[in-house]
Image (cartoon, rainbow, N blue to C red):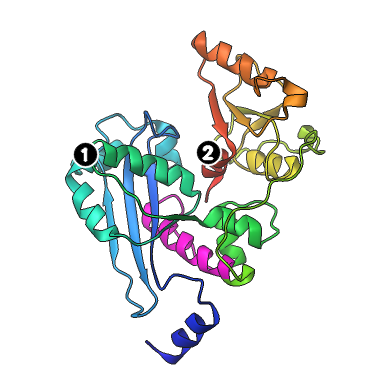
Amino acid sequence: MDKETAEFLAKHPYIPTKFIALDAETTGLEAETDKIIEIAAIKFDLLSNDHPVFESLINPAVKLPRKITNITGITNKMLVDQPPFAELAHDLKAFIGDLPIVAYNAKFDKGFLDAEFANVGIVLNNHYHCALNLAKAAFSLPNYKLATVAQHCNIQLDEAHRAKADAIAAGRVFMCAAVTLGHINEIKPKSAFGKPKGADHKAYPPNEDGKLYGQTIVFTGELSITRAEAFEAAAELGLEIKTGVSKKTDYLVVGEQDENLVGPSGISSKQLKAQDLIDEGFDIQILDEDEFMELTKG
């Protein structure tokens, strides 16, 4: 260990000297039904400055949606000769060991890993750190896409939405945010309930070059980011922001609800209408805030 690293670790003893930075690319957003198509795990070893990599494309045994190819650049042809997750599960588990895992939007990656490992009888009990939540606590930024936070931390991210590049960036963002905060408690206190604060959705026209241009999105409930931040992120994706759910809605983002506003069910009228339309066969994706942030990542 060189002198500079020794001084860094002495100054920031709360940062793990060894951890796994991980990212999974997937066929969709639902861990119960969608599959991992690419996995990367980077073993950050700050003691030796050696960072081994485990990475692989994965054959999900299902056709890859076009929108995922548009986001990641990964095609069905690239996956057809790749191993299924079951074939590499034991090697991945051995590589991770009992080290803490860092991911950007850890809830998302953990959900998929738990589901995939469960299919082969493996339980992963490692502790997770969420670099996204840590970044939200550390920095005041217009949005918290991985690319935005990486740029703020002067971290290079050349191939966003590919597992290795995103995993490396997540690990470095984690350290940058931890140094800024002086701790690694990534839980951001929730603000008090109230009506979502102010932003005119009409002031955020969809980006015609966005990857989801031509689709629509609706928000309901309290998010940890402001409505303006949410609208900006959605518009950048090319999404048209609407105030009400209809048959033309593609995404509904559901935040935490105030029962004083929506009643004891805790479910807003927008979500109830979306669920009714889904039952009728309309393709509306209901996302929580973490899933929305994953959609905007990179």
Q: Circle 1 sits on which residue?
A: 120
Front-most of residues 63 and 104: 104
Q: Position of residue 178 (x, y in %)?
A: 56, 67
- Residue indicated by mark 2: 291
Q: Which of the 4 quarters of the picture holds residue 267?
A: top right
Query: Is residue 193 visible in the rendered structure shown here?
Result: yes
Residue at x 72%, y 26% (from the top left corner): 259
Depth check, front residue: 144 or 191: 191
Which secondary structure lies at badge 2?
Answer: helix
Q: Which one is in front in this view, the residue at disc 2 or the one at disc 1?
A: 1
Quadrant location, the N terminus = bottom left
Whichever of labels 2 and 1 marks the residue nearer the N terminus, that label is 1
Q: Where is residue 39 in the image (x, y as percent from the top left)?
A: 32, 50
For numbered disc 1, what is the local secondary structure? loop
- Residue at 63 percent across and 14 percent down: it is 273
Q: In which quarter of the image is residue 217?
A: top right
Going by the numbered disc 2, the residue's amino acid type is: Glu
Left or right: 266 with respect to 8? right
x and y percentages locating residue 157 in the rendered image: 48, 61
User: What segment is highlighted magenta in the picture?
Assistant: 154-178
Give the spatial CA distance, label 2 vs label 1.
25 Å
What secondary structure characterizes most of the magenta part? helix
The number of numbered discs placed on residues in the rendered structure image is 2
Choose top left, top right, bottom left or bottom right for residue 289.
Answer: top right
Q: Is residue 154 something that shows in the picture?
A: no
Identity, as a three-letter code, of the amino acid under mark 1 = Val
Considering only vertical position in the picture, is 226 above or below 202? below
User: Left or right: 268 with respect to 286?
Assistant: right
Give the percent coordinates (x, y) of residue 134. 58, 58
Magenta stretch encompasses residue 163: yes
